[in-house]
Image (spheres, rainbow, N blue to C red):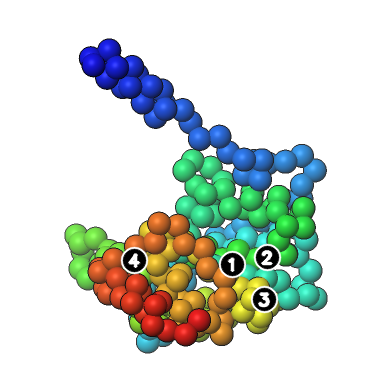
Amino acid sequence: MQRSLSVLLICASFAFAAEYELGPDSKVQPGVPKGTVTKHSWTSAGTIFPGTVRDYWVYVPAQYDASKPAAVMVFQDGVKWASNVGNGWLTPIVFDNLIAKGDMPVTIGIFVNPGMLPARSPGLKPRLNRNYEYASTSGDYARFIVEEILPEVARDYNLTDDPNLRGIGGSSGGGQASFTAAWNRPDVFRRVLSFIGSYVNIRGADIYQSRVRKMEP
């Protein structure tokens, strides 16, 4: 029994030591045109999340043609999705490869960070607005993206109005926020990418188990 347990523990340690091997679409490929990623800042003067300040990044593929509306993909917790280094999701590399192969349409990526509320007085820290924005099941976050972020990006780029060519995604709270945005605004978003979405009762997202069963597709 002791020998069997020792073997099991050794095998388990080797399993955990193995590193995940990225697939070819997550690696820079020779001859594939590279898109550009630019960083921007947005201070909300609207009534949805007033006074919040956030960074966002815009990915534009090399194949983008301003005369043709581009597909759109919006990511929450934008900084990690826009990054090609460290523990980022390598999204620009993946987009470069998939667009070059024709596996996805020419797509502009919009990577949006949660808002920060400036410190109320010296010596205090800014307050992260992430839970308030992401965990709610109201349509407020969808309104924010639709009424503030998309129009701002559309000032510089030709974005499609076709909801079938508009996606929204994220992980954890960002995944739940993405599902909520599409649930409330299917006229804007028909594609959702949700990694380990936080469908728990932080601000009522556990209700989706019932809503999905009861609502018409």
Mark 4: which amino acid? Tyr
Near mark 3 (Cα within 10 A), the count class, few <14, some 14-19 or many ≥20, is many
The residue shown at (19%, 60%) is 123
Q: Circles 1 and 2: CB distance less than 8 Å?
A: yes
Residue most toward the top? 3
Instruction: Measuring from the top left, give residue 37's x and y in whole percent.
Output: 62, 57
Residue type indicated by callout 1 = Met
Callout 1: helix, strand or loop? strand
* Horizontal side of residue 101 vs 177, given as left or right: right
Q: Check the picture and name the quadrant holding the N terminus.
A: top left
Relative to 72, residue 96 above or below:
above
Residue 59 occupies quadrant: bottom right
Amino acid marked by disc 2: Thr
Examine the rendering and report whether any part of residue 132 can be seen: no
Read off the residue under disc 2: 107
Alpha-carbon span between mark 3 and mark 1: 10 Å
Which element is circle 3 on?
A: loop
Indicate the amino acid at tag 3.
Leu
Q: Distance between the Cα atoms at labels 2 and 3? A: 9 Å
- Residue at mark 1: 73
| For residue 158, above or below residue 76 | below
Q: Quadrant of residue 179?
A: bottom left
Within 10 Å of disc 1 (Cα), the crowding (few <14, some 14-19, many 20+) is many
Q: Earlier in the sequence, mark 3 or mark 1?
A: 1
Residue at image mark 4 = 199
Tell me how far mark 1 sits from mark 2, CA to CA. Answer: 7 Å
Residue underneath mark 3: 159
Q: Nearer the viewer, residue 61 or 200?
A: 200
Q: CA distance from mark 3 to mark 4?
A: 30 Å
In screen coordinates, is 204 left or right of 82? left
